[in-house]
Amino acid sequence: MANIHSQKKRIQRAARERLENRRYTSKIKTYFRRLERAVAEGDDGTADSEHRVLMQTIDKAVKRGAIHRNAGARKKSRAARLRRGSQEG
């Protein structure tokens, strides 16, 4: 445990920021699973809406710094590929 006042504050801030980052990453995983489920069921309307929300969430997470810019691009690319694959069939 830290003895320095500023270090105690830094530990609290790091914990708060970690929780916020976890909220974003958890939300992204949830929407990705929902998109996969909608694609597997062949529900195009739901898949479209889930894809749109997933893209917005990834963009927000990148903007906030919760995930790295390249990780966000990779997730968006994978989601788009998943979405395109469902439209071809």
Image: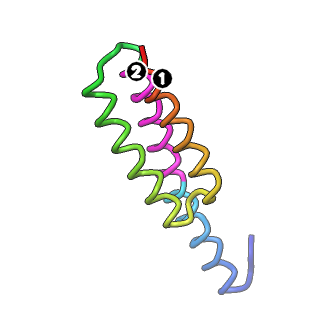
Q: Name the residue at 49% across, 43% down.
A: 26
Q: Amino acid at mark 1?
A: Gly
Q: Mark 2 highlights which residue?
A: 39
Q: Residue at x 57, y 51 (%)?
A: 72
Q: Position of residue 21 (x, y in %)?
A: 54, 57
Q: Position of residue 11 (x, y in %)?
A: 65, 71
Going by the image, does 17 lie left or right of 8? left
Which of discs 1 and 2 lies nearer the camera? The answer is 1
Mark 1 Cα within 10 Å, few/some/many (few <14, many 20+)? Answer: few
Assess whether residue 19 is covered by the magenta stretch: no
Q: Which mark is residue 71?
A: none
Q: Is residue 36 magenta?
A: yes
Q: Earlier in the sequence, mark 1 or mark 2?
A: 2
> Which residue is tagged 1?
85
The span shown in magenta is 22-38
Q: Is residue 38 left or right of residue 85?
A: left
